Every structure is written in structure tokens, then in C-alpha cells.
Image (cartoon, grey):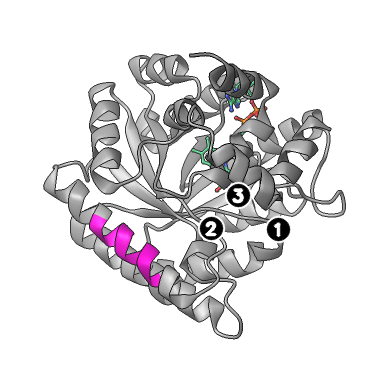
């Protein structure tokens, strides 16, 4: 219920203007977003590197409605990859992209525009010696996104895909993707989806996540277990034990600012941990999704708004 109210608020322009205009919103943004530009994202990556973690950097923004903006986003990623290479960080940092930010939803040739922009980012990543993972958005884009990832993988086989466990189709997608050389991030899923396509109950999503993790971890690919859920982290560790390649054959992933102590604990225990680091000026939609996930974050937000 609360989740639905927040997601509805996220879509309201009026609410957005009010929240953005509140100076103390900044304190909350700073917890979850690593600044607004490339240098601040590079600095955050250095900090994670010092803590023994890897990073995947996301230039915030989605649902691009014109080609010029898609071009701008592509340019930001290329500049980011240059910045990571200059700082000697491409061994520990890759990038995450959203196809809707690269033009996927543009009328007529949206998919072709997104594929072209994503290819340019993958080429820049390859030059810099790192990789790209393609985020998954709402269920109306799943087929298109998996299709584009398959095309990107022809030239850039290390391009990562994302599977959302809450979708009823995802076990089948995991079977298709659990192949040698594939990199697959498994997350629960962050969008509000209808019951016709997605499990709704928390327990059902947990079970679906476990089934998907089992398929991916039994295959020869590289699974990336993206979750903060203690139950799934314990289960993932158990399922991954004894895999060929040991701890280098999979990784855990978490979001910047969420459970940082657990991120460090897992890294110190010898697991590979990658932190998803969002940065950029378009932080509003991202922040609202994080708040919708967890009422405690809403309290954190209100406290920041009302205290000095
Ligand atoms: P939850 O059930 O949400 O949380 C389990 C526990 O983790 C909570 O009880 C709490 O202890 C802790 N926790 C969780 N969230 C928070 C929080 N916000 N603040 C503080 N503590 C918290 N979704 C997509 O749809 N597409 C993507 O491409 C995508 N990429 C992702 C990449 C990464 C690296 C991660 C970590 C998540 C990604 N997600 C993506 C989001 C994901 O789908 C979930 O919405 C999100 O991770 C919350 O699910 P959870 O597994 O952490 O479990």
C-alpha cells in the first residue's frame, strides 16, 4: 500500500517539484547517489576500491523522449569510461546502462537507436578494458532488452544481462542465459507489475529468486546475485560453494548506500562484492524507487527533511 502511494507520488510532477525544492532532500540524495558528475562517480569508485569492493556505475536517467538526450547520455558514459581508465579503475569498475535512457522508447526506430548507442558504450568499455551490464526495466521491455543484449553479445560477448526474479517468465530466461561466457545479474525486480506477469507475495518472489539462482549457479556462466536480503545472501553463498572457479566464479551485488556494513563483511570474507553506484542529476526517479522498497527509508527521508 505504502509502496503504491510512493510510486504514485514519484509520478506526480507537483510532488516532484516540491521534493526537489526542499534543501534537506540533498542529505538523503547523498546517501544513495554518488554525486552529479563523472569526477564524483570516479571518487566514489576509488572509495569502494579501498574497501575491497568492485563497482558498476549508472548514469541516472530513463525514458528518454528525444534523440539528442539519448546522444547526451551516451556521451556521458563514454566520458565516464575515459575517467575510469585515467584513474586506473577499469579493473574494478564497469558500467550499467538503461536502454530507455539510450532511446529504446523513441517512436519507430527506438530499438535501433538504443542498440547503436549501447554498442558505442560497449566499444568504449572494451577499449578501456571493462564491461557493460544492461539493466532491466518494466516488463513491457523485457523481450526487446533481452534481444538487444543478444545482439550486443555478438561483438561484446561479456555484456551482462539482468533477470528479475519476480517475473513469472524468468526461470525460462535463466535457463536460456545459463551458458558459458554469459554474465547475468539476478535481482528481485523493482517495478510495479501486474499479477498476470509477476509474483506479488514476498514469499513467492523469494522462492522464485532461489529457483533462478539455482539455475544460474548450476550453469557455466557468471552469476551476479544482486540482493540485500539476508536470507538470499546465505542461500546464495551455500549454492555457490564448491562451484568451479571458487569465489571468482560469481559475485554479490548491492546498491550504493544500502547495507554498506554487509558489503564490507562479505568482501572481507573473501566474496566478490560489486556496488551499483548511481550518479548524475536525474536522481529523482531512482530515489523514489529506493524509498518505495523500504518504509524505513521513508522515515530516514522525513527525518532529514525536518531536522537540521
Ligand atoms: P528486499 O526484500 O527489498 O530487502 C531485504 C532486506 O535488505 C531488507 O529487509 C533490509 O534489511 C535490506 N534492504 C533492502 N532494501 C533496503 C533499502 N532501500 N535500504 C536499507 N535496507 C534495505 N531492479 C530492476 O528491476 N532492474 C535492475 O536492473 C536492477 N538492478 C539492480 C542492481 C543491483 C546491484 C541491485 C542490488 C538491485 C537492482 N535492482 C534492479 C533492484 C532489485 O530488483 C530490488 O528492487 C532491490 O534490490 C530490493 O530487493 P532485495 O533483494 O534487496 O530485497
Residue annotated with mark 2: 62
Image coordinates for residue 101, horizontal then vertical, percent = 49, 62
Query: Which quarter of the figure has residue 87?
Result: top left
Q: Residue at x 65, y 67 (%)?
A: 143
Seen from the viewer's position, the closer of residues 296 and 225 is 296
Residue annotated with mark 1: 139
| Residue 293 drawn above or below residue 117 | above
Element under label 1? Answer: helix
Point out the image quarter for the N terminus.
Answer: top right
Q: Residue at x 40, y 33 (%)?
A: 275
**Does residue 208 appear left or right of residue 75 in this picture?**
right
Q: Residues within 10 Å of mark 3 (few under 14, many from 20)?
A: many
Which residues, given as a range, are shown in magenta?
71-79
Query: Which quarter of the figure has residue 72?
Result: bottom left
Residue annotated with mark 3: 163
Q: Residue at x 28, y 35 (%)?
A: 45
Amino acid at each position: 500500500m505504502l509502496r503504491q502511494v510512493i510510486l504514485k507520488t514519484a509520478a506526480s510532477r507537483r510532488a516532484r517539484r516540491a521534493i526537489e525544492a526542499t534543501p534537506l532532500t540533498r542529505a538523503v540524495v547523498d546517501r544513495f547517489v554518488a554525486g552529479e558528475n563523472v569526477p564524483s562517480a570516479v571518487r566514489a569508485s576509488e572509495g569502494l576500491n579501498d574497501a575491497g569492493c568492485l563497482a558498476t556505475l549508472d548514469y541516472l536517467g530513463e525514458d528518454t523522449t528525444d534523440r539528442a538526450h539519448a546522444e547526451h547520455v551516451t556521451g556521458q558514459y563514454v566520458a565516464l569510461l575515459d575517467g575510469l581508465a585515467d584513474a586506473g579503475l577499469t579493473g574494478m569498475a564497469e558500467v550499467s546502462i538503461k536502454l530507455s535512457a539510450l532511446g529504446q522508447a523513441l517512436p519507430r526506430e527506438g530499438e535501433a537507436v538504443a542498440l547503436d548507442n549501447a554498442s558505442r558504450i560497449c566499444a568504449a568499455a572494451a577499449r578501456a578494458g571493462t564491461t557493460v551490464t544492461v539493466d532491466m526495466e518494466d516488463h513491457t521491455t523485457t523481450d526487446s532488452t533481452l534481444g538487444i543484449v543478444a545482439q550486443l553479445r555478438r561483438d561484446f560477448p561479456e555484456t551482462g544481462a539482468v533477470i528479475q526474479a519476480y517475473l513469472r517468465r524468468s526461470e525460462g530466461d535463466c535457463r536460456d542465459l545459463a551458458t558459458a561466457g554469459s554474465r547475468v545479474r539476478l535481482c528481485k525486480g523493482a517495478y510495479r507489475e501486474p499479477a498476470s506477469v509477476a509474483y506479488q507475495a514476498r514469499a513467492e518472489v523469494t522462492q522464485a529468486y532461489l529457483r533462478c539462482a539455482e539455475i544460474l549457479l548450476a550453469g557455466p556462466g557468471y552469476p551476479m546475485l544482486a540482493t540485500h536480503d539476508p536470507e538470499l545472501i546465505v542461500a546464495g553463498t551455500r549454492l555457490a560453494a564448491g562451484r568451479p572457479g571458487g569465489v571468482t566464479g560469481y559475485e554479490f551485488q548491492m546498491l550504493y548506500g544500502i547495507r554498506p556494513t554487509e558489503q564490507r563483511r562479505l568482501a572481507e570474507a573473501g566474496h566478490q562484492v560489486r556496488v551499483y553506484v548511481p550518479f548524475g542529476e536525474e536522481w529523482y526517479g531512482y530515489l523514489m524507487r529506493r524509498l518505495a522498497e523500504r518504509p524505513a527509508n521513508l522515515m530516514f527521508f522525513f527525518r532529514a527533511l525536518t531536522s537540521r
